[in-house]
């Protein structure tokens, strides 16, 4: 019976421990916090978006091989993951059709965290909380895992699921990444991803609290990302799924210094042709009434000012140049930005251990045999909507199954 130590009782680590124990391994799950799974508890506004209802592999972001990423994702089909949660964990899932997300029917994230930990215990996993791992080293055919204020633990195989750098108050401090680098793994540059964007520009300063659905395109010299969905003006800038899903472009442009990035907004579902029809130069309607009919009043007024169009002007009075400026603003308007909320508010970390350092079938390190990696330490993340939990479940399961064999 192989001895397996799993480091980190988050989504990926708990899944890895379950499948290692099910595979017959003597499994110990180490967790630095007193309860584990804290990102599960805060996800989805406390409801936990367990999975997407459908999977688009192209929406993942990685600096590693997209082909390797696809191989990993396909190892555990979405339908089988849904069945695992509903049948094995005992948590019925409900689809939120508008957002294509799957939540527990109870809409309680705690049910997901507690259900996974209970299944781990039932499968034979020994959970050890309040245990901070300080080092991982090979000693002959064994692995030695050093912990704070206790004797080192020994195992035949070790699974590292220590997470990244996002939301540090949940226990993610990057220690696992440092250990993996010390063991010879190559890390692609890490950065905050799915994080709110900040601005010091006064254009939209008085719109805090206004929300709507938009389409965004973030562009830099090296990258481009598009997203549609909820958008929220905040007192510091912008948030909402559409913003979070393109934020990695601006974050990386800022981090790299040599690159600049822009964000363009399509403020409604109307494209250029549709707005051209709405703003046809006839009739006595004021242009403000047309734009306000499609957007929140205060935002409409700001956009008219941004386009340098007098709101009281009648449609028939608009010049061709004024109409062009207004349509440009409504369809591809500039969204001024300066920075971001960083790891404190980031849903995930981008970058991490390059995927070529692991076997995509088993998650075993090609650098250190007997060491397995899963979850956020690996160089991949997906958009809002259960994609990052899916990555945790898939990689955790693969590591657990392989480590126990």
Image (cartoon, rainbow, N blue to C red):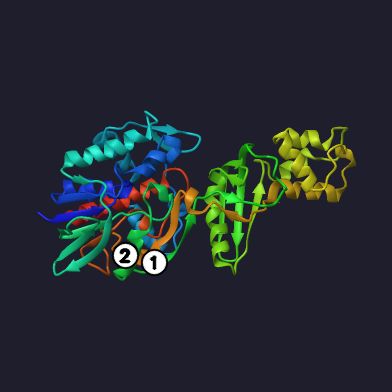
Q: Residue furthest front?
A: 149
Q: Residue at x 51, y 54 (%)?
A: 342
Spot occupied by residue 160 in the image (x, y as percentages of width and height): 28, 57
Q: Which residue is mark 2?
A: 180
Q: Is residue 399 left or right of residue 178?
A: left
Q: Position of residue 264 (x, y in %)?
A: 65, 52
Q: Which residue is mark 1?
A: 187
Residue 345 seen in render: yes
Q: Quadrant of the C terminus?
A: bottom left
Give residue 174's position: percent from left, percent from top. Answer: 38, 58
317 displayed left or right of 70:
right
Q: Nearer the viewer, residue 272 or 135?
A: 135
Label 2–label 1 contact, CB within 8 A? yes
Q: Quadrant of the N terminus?
A: bottom left
Q: Dot 1 lies on which element?
A: strand
For numbered disc 2, what is the local secondary structure?
helix
Pick out the residue farthest to the top. Answer: 106
For the residue pair 297 and 277, the one nearer the viewer reads as 297
Question: Looking at the image, which residue is at 14% across and 70% down?
Answer: 140
Q: Residue furthest right?
A: 317
Name the mark on residue 253.
none
Q: Is residue 202 above or below residue 297?
A: below
Q: Please say whether residue 49 is visible from this viewpoint.
A: no
Residue 215, x across and y down, in percent: 61, 46
């Amino acid at each position: 019976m192989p001895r397996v130590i799993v480091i980190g009782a988050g989504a990926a680590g708990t899944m890895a421990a379950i499948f290692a124990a099910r595979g017959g391994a003597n499994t110990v799950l180490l967790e630095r916090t007193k309860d584990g799974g804290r990102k599960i508890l805060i996800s989805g506004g406390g409801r936990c978006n367990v999975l997407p209802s459908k999977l688009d592999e192209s929406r993942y972001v990685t600096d590693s091989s997209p082909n390797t990423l696809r191989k990993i994702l396909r190892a555990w089909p979405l339908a089988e993951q849904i069945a695992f949660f509903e049948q094995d964990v005992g948590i019925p899932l409900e689809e939120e059709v508008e957002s294509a997300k799957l939540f527990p029917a109870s809409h309680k994230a705690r049910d997901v965290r507690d259900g996974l930990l209970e299944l781990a215990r039932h499968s034979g996993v020994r959970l050890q909380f309040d245990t901070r791992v300080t080092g991982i080293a090979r000693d002959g055919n064994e692995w030695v895992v050093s912990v704070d204020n206790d004797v080192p633990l020994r195992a035949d195989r070790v699974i590292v699921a220590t997470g990244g750098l996002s939301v540090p108050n949940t226990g993610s401090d990057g220690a696992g990444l440092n250990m993996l680098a010390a063991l010879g793994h190559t890390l692609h540059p890490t950065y905050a991803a799915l994080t709110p964007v900040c601005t010091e520009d006064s254009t939209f300063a008085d719109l805090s609290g206004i929300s709507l659905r938009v389409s965004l395109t973030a562009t830099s010299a090296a990258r481009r990302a598009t997203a549609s969905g909820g958008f929220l003006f905040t007192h510091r800038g912008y948030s909402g799924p559409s913003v979070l899903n393109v934020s990695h472009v601006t974050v990386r442009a800022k981090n790299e210094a040599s690159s600049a990035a822009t964000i363009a907004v399509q403020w409604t579902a109307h494209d250029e042709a549709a707005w051209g029809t709405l703003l046809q130069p006839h009739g006595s309607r004021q242009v403000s009434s047309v734009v306000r009919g499609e957007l929140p009043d205060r935002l409409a007024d700001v956009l008219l000012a941004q386009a340098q169009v007098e709101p009281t002007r009648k449609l028939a009075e608009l010049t061709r140049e004024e109409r062009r400026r207004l349509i440009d603003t409504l369809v591809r308007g500039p969204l001024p930005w300066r920075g971001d909320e960083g790891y404190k508010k980031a849903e995930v970390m981008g970058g991490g251990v390059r995927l070529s350092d692991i076997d995509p079938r088993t998650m075993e390190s090609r650098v250190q045999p007997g060491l397995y990696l899963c979850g956020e330490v690996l160089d991949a993340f997906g958009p809002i909507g259960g994609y990052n939990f899916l990555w945790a479940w898939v990689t955790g399961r693969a590591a657990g199954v392989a480590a126990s064999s």
